Image (tube, rainbow, N blue to C red):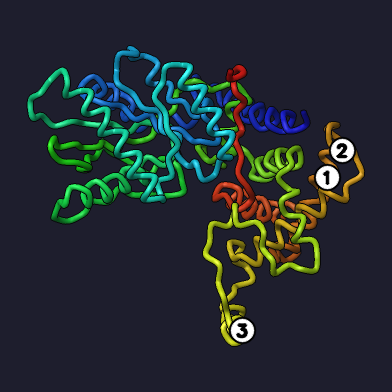
Amino acid sequence: MAATHFARRIGTAVKEKTGRKKLMQGPWYDSFMAAASHAIAERLPLVDIIVEVRDARIPLSSECKLLRNYPGSLRKIIALNKMDLAGRSGLQAWREYFIESNCISCGVNAHNKENIREFLSLIQRQVRELRRTDRANYTVTVMLIGIPNVGKSALANALHLVGRISAAEKGKLKHAIVSPEPRETKDIRSFKIGSHPNIYVLDTPSVLSPEVPDVDVLSKLILTGAIGDCLVRRKEIAQYFLAILNSTEQYKRWAKLSTEDDDDDDDGLFFNSPVECLSSSGLHMKEKKQIPMDHTQDNIVQDVRRTLYETISTFEGNIRYENEMDALIARQFSALQEAFHISTECREATHDKVAGKLLNLFRTGRLGHYILDHLPRNIH
């Protein structure tokens, strides 16, 4: 598969950079992450429940290797966060895989209150199981742990908000810092999410294994934002995403955008935005507010989808061959420059801007839903 070639190109580039600098570990594993790993490891035996937060788009590649050193007797839940960015049917297959592996798992969307209520209920059921063996009125601690950029802090905030409302708690809400950039959380903080018994969730700094993973896993971690873009050029990361998109049926969902009836948006599955009914004056006001350089606006997202559909559907080469996939991606970069309204500069600077905007739309779910990992075996 041609997409594998682009993935290995990214992973190999990072491994070569690490080798040239003669690093014994990944460049992301600095003194702060080492200290955070040590602090979490000390706390792990003291908590009642562990919630390992993973990215639903990479259910295996986002595994937290730190937990491999602890016995399976620890009560653990695998939370596949960002489920809104992954395919629903594919995610169900992964949940079945974890069930067969004797793991408790669930899909989570930290920005959906109803889903957070369901997740909180799952935690409370686990707490009740704990209390069957110890009926004392104790305080339960739940630790969120995971690699960078899987949404631990957003999940902690959501559980804190929903849990306090459900328990009719009063007082000032606490907030964990949330950022699209990885490694924003700097210390371990607690948030109350339940009463009778009191339940506290611990938000922790992100931890990655110091070992450099294999090139396939490494490329997925970089594409989803778990590892910063600084280790490899953004253009190469965007090329990897385009190779994935070009190899799937995703683009066919945007076929209607290539017709004259552009106003009929049949792609609500990926927009997740309310339908607006505007008068002609209201529509004019909305158009005036649109900023040509803001690639997150609906009209620009539509143009990007249309561009991707048309470049793929009219390409006559065989994308199973690497050189043909390269040719298609080169054509897409040129076409996307116009869709993003990027002025002509030097070629590399233009491609870097196209890549940055394209990756942002992918990482926020505006260009479809993807699960990048493959199931280890068939589910029966």
Q: Please tell me which residue lies in front, 257 or 348.
A: 257
Looking at the image, tell me whether mark 1 or mark 3 is earlier in sequence order.
3
CA distance for labels 2 and 3: 43 Å
Q: Point out the frontmost of discs 2 and 3.
A: 3
Mark 2 secondary-structure assignment: helix
Image-based side of 362 in relation to 245, left or right: left
Q: Residue at x 73, y 48 (%)?
A: 251
In x, y percent, where is residue 292?
64, 71
Up-down relation of residue 12 to residue 73 (above or below): below
Residue 18, how many percent across, how many down?
A: 57, 26
Residue at disc 1, secondary structure: helix
Residue, disc 3:
284
Q: Position of residue 24 (x, y in %)?
A: 50, 19
Q: Quadrant of the C terminus?
A: top right
Tell me the residue that label 1 is attached to. Answer: 328
> Is disc 1 surrounded by few (<14), some (14 to 19) or many (20+) residues within 10 Å?
many
Q: Which residue is painted at 59% across and 65% down in the image? A: 297
* Residue type highlighted by circle 3: His
Q: Are marks 1 and 3 in contact (CB under 8 Å)?
A: no
- Say whether residue 58 is visible: yes
Is the residue 216 above or below the residue 111 in the image?
above
Query: Could you tell me which residue is drawn at 38 percent across and 21 percent down?
Result: 66
Residue that protrudes farthest toward the front in the picture: 380
**Do labels 1 and 2 touch, CB within 8 Å?**
yes
In the image: residue 82, left or right of residue 20 = left
